[in-house]
Amino acid sequence: MRLPFGDATSSMLAAAGQAGYVNVSWSIDPRDWAGIPADEVVANTLNDIKSGSIIMFQTSYPDQKSQALPALIKAIRDQGFEIVPLTELLYFGQ
């Protein structure tokens, strides 16, 4: 689960853990929530991308995402990175 604003207290994390959840935070915030153009979302992401990065995207501005994601996916792959499910990145079930 992702806590709103990444704001986690020890009691929140303990309660989540007792319920079987794992708190996952992000390492890249492309600022898509600010309604910026798709090319800025791509640039903001690529500026900080590295192996193991977790990119946080909001559900707002779906047209922006539909423009940004294909270019972003291509750029990430062109840099030699592989996009994997979060469960693989965090080694669940292995």
Image (spheres, rainbow, N blue to C red):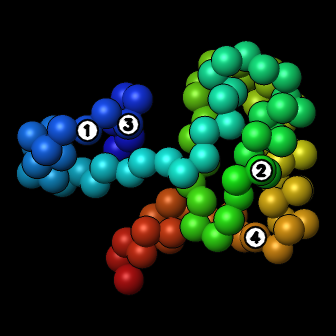
Which residue does the image show at 78% across and 34% down from the upper left? 41
Cα separation between marks 2 and 1? 26 Å
Circles 1 and 4, Cβ within 8 Å, touching? The answer is no
Circles 1 and 3, Cβ within 8 Å, touching? The answer is yes
Q: Can you give x and y, in whole percent of width and height, for residue 26 in the image?
A: 50, 48
Circles 2 and 1, Cβ within 8 Å, touching? The answer is no
Q: SS class of the residue under badge 3?
A: helix
Q: Amino acid at mark 4?
A: Phe
Which residue does the image show at 68% across and 37% down from the upper left? 30
The quadrant in which residue 78 appears is bottom right
Q: Would residue 19 be visible to someone looking at this image?
A: no
From the image, tell me which residue sits under label 2: 47
Cα separation between marks 3 and 2? 21 Å
Q: Nearer the viewer, residue 38 or 93?
A: 38
From the image, tell me which residue sits under label 4: 81
**Mark sitting earlier along the chain (1/4):** 1
Q: SS class of the residue under badge 2?
A: helix
**Mark sitting earlier along the chain (4/2):** 2
Circles 4 and 2, Cβ within 8 Å, touching? The answer is no
Please tell me whether mark 1 or mark 4 is closer to you in this view.
Answer: 1
Q: Can you give x and y, in whole percent of width and height, for residue 63 in the image?
A: 80, 21
Cα separation between marks 4 and 2? 14 Å
Circles 3 and 2, Cβ within 8 Å, touching? The answer is no
**Mark sitting earlier along the chain (3/4):** 3
Which residue does the image show at 41% across and 29% down from the upper left? 5
